[in-house]
Amino acid sequence: MKSMSGGEKSVVCVGKVLIGGDNPLAIIAGPCAVEGEQMLRDTVRPVIQSGAHMIRGGAFKPRTSPYSFQGLGVKGLKILNRIGREMGVPVVTEVMDSGDVELVAEYADVLQVGARNMQNFSLLKRLGRINKPIILKRGMAATIEEWLMAAEHIMVGGNEQVILCERGIRTHEQWTRNTLDLSAVAVVKNVSSLPVIVDPSHATGHTHLVAPMAKAAVAAGADGLMIEVHLCPEKAVSDGQQSLTPRQFSSMIAEISRVAAAVGRCCQ
Ligand code: PEP
Ligand code: MN
């Protein structure tokens, strides 16, 4: 199996950003969804100044309810791409359908497979045939083995640029949106060569829990973080309750740098 090695670590390159191995923590930040051009620009500019290396924003949104905002689609991809080029940073966005892979790959530097699609095998197979890094989120009810096997489905096709993302699993607990499984980070680091990042926003569902869990993720050995940030969380069309303001993001980065330094990890 391609990813099964606790020895030599794979490093995924996204432009100038290197993820995994001994590289500095990779920070991906941005709104849950691309809502509009000016809003995205105003959100990500301070976030990049505070230390984010890549920006995120969903154009195709996997919403629980079909009546919720589904994303701006191609218009959202174009906005995200434009802002990324303008700011000089790579962009990450979700692809939900195997038929959209080519389209999304035209605009995004990294393609994200969401938790709900972790075992969408035709999507994984299609992603195995492109030459772009993939962030593979852990399914909300997936075991670590199933998650690693989903990564294999991409890698056997020839695309070995896979980054795993722990985003919490569903448990009986109601005080958090999901339960962040940080032991999965340690397990994956031990058995797999793949980089692993953590998304404390979807894992916890609450703004005040994001920084503590981000720090814990860094201490547990995560190679990076994915954080939802919104200029005005109370007005966000999706996931405002778990989004940080750019100011909260900036203070979180300061706290994370101290934890990173304490565990011997560089945070640029
Ligand atoms: C997201 O990152 O926008 C998202 C929908 O996350 P998840 O697939 O982890 O729920
Ligand atoms: Mn979200």
Image (cartoon, grey):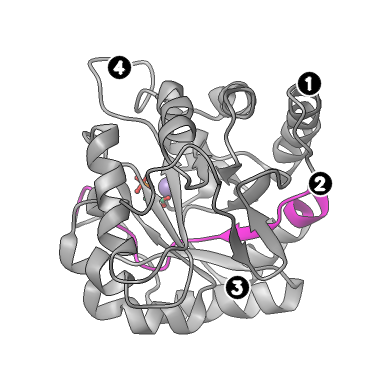
Among numbered discs 4 and 1, the one appearing first in the sequence: 4
Residue at 72% x, 67% y is 16
Circles 2 and 3, Cβ within 8 Å, touching? The answer is no
Quadrant of the rendered structure where residue 146 is?
A: top left
**Left or right relative to 168: residue 231:** right
Cα separation between marks 1 and 2: 14 Å
- Residue at numbered disc 4: 174
Compare marks 4 and 3 and give the one earlier in the sequence: 3
How far apart are labels 4 and 3 at the CA level? 35 Å
Is the residue 73 above or below the residue 255 in the image? below
> Residue 226's spot in the image, x, y percent?
55, 45
**Which residue is located at x 52 percent, y 63 percent?**
92
At x 34%, y 67%, the residue is 95
- Label 4 – label 1 distance at C-alpha: 32 Å
Q: Mark 3 points at which residue?
A: 37
Tell us which disc is closer to us: 1 or 3. Answer: 1
| 1 or 3: tag closer to the N-terminus | 3
Who comes first in sequence, dot 2 or dot 3? Answer: 3
**First in residue order: circle 4 vs circle 2:** 4
The span picked out in magenta is 46-65
In front of the other: 94 or 147: 147
Asked whether residue 61 is drawn in magenta, I would say yes
Q: Is residue 43 above or below residue 110?
A: above
Closer mark to the observer between disc 4 and disc 3? 4
Mark 4 vs 3: CB contact within 8 A: no
Q: Report the predominant secondary structure element of the magenta stretch.
A: loop
> According to the image, label 1 marks what residue?
262
Residue 25 visible (yes or no): yes
Secondary structure category for the residue under label 4: loop
At label 1, the amino acid type is: Ala
- Is the distance from the Cβ of mark 1 to the nearest ligand 1 atom less than 8 Å? no
Name the residue that disc number 2 marks: 268
